[in-house]
Amino acid sequence: MRIRIQSVTLECMRQPLNNRFALKARRRELRRSLTVAEARLWSCLQRDRLGWKFRRQHSIGPFIVDFYCPSGRLAIELDGTAHDSESASYYDHKRSEYLREKGVRVIRFVNDDAIRNLEGVLHMIRAELSAVERDRASNGDENHTTPPANEAAAPKAHNHTTPPACAGTPPHERRGSLGASPPVKEHSRADNRTSRKGSAQR
């Protein structure tokens, strides 16, 4: 029995921490069946839209988190009504405890937040990523590039009925809405002719 326990322990130690093969089918299944809240938040996290790379339905050890930022070691969880029971709350607590032991920060939101207050959710995510940057700066870690300042800024308040700026908007357009460049002055053809005439007289 003791030999069996040791072999199981060694086998667990050999397995990779991230995206274990045994969970591959389950991860794919979850990606194909995103909830409305998950799809809404993912539209703002994908393609490095916050200046950080996120993955959806990423497994860490035996657990699958909704969203994960590898460089920031930040996990984001969206909880529905199924998490309200006592057993589910205990499971979530043990899972968060495991992730923290692995050096992963965990922030949780309820699904309703991602649907009705998405800008507030994004603001909290940005705040967590900013905390990661501050911790690394204090520890002298310069291996990670700080995201642009306009990406880390707190979003403007939006009415709940207004879709968020990031939903379905290309990244370059969204960045422009946060800090648009001054308009370029346009010259008419008459102005150009007058300018050339004046220079010829001089």
Image (spheres, grey):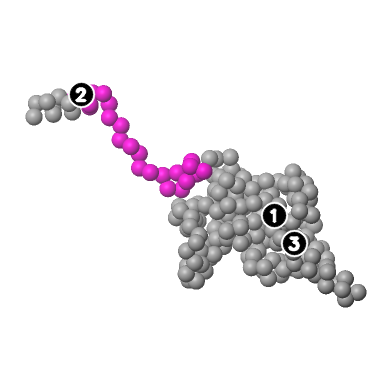
The secondary element bearing badge 3 is classed as loop
Q: Residue at x 64, y 51 (%)?
A: 55
Q: Nearer the viewer, mark 1 or mark 2?
A: 1
* Residue in the foreground of this view, choosing between 49 and 84: 49
Stretch in magenta: 171-194
Q: CA distance from mark 1 to mark 3?
A: 15 Å
Location of the C terminus (image quadrant): top left
Say if mark 2 contacts mark 3, CB within 8 Å: no
Q: Residues within 10 Å of mark 1 (few under 14, many from 20)?
A: many
Task: Answer with mark 2 or mark 3, whichever residue precedes in sequence.
Answer: 3
> As drawn, which residue projects farthest toward the left?
202
The secondary element bearing badge 2 is classed as helix
Is 90 rendered above or below residue 124?
below
Q: Nearer the viewer, mark 2 or mark 3?
A: 3
Q: Nearer the viewer, mark 1 or mark 3?
A: 3
Q: Residue at x 15, y 24 (%)?
A: 197
Residue on which the image places disc 2: 193
Three-letter amino acid code at the position of disc 2: Arg
Left or right of 163 on screen, residue 147: left
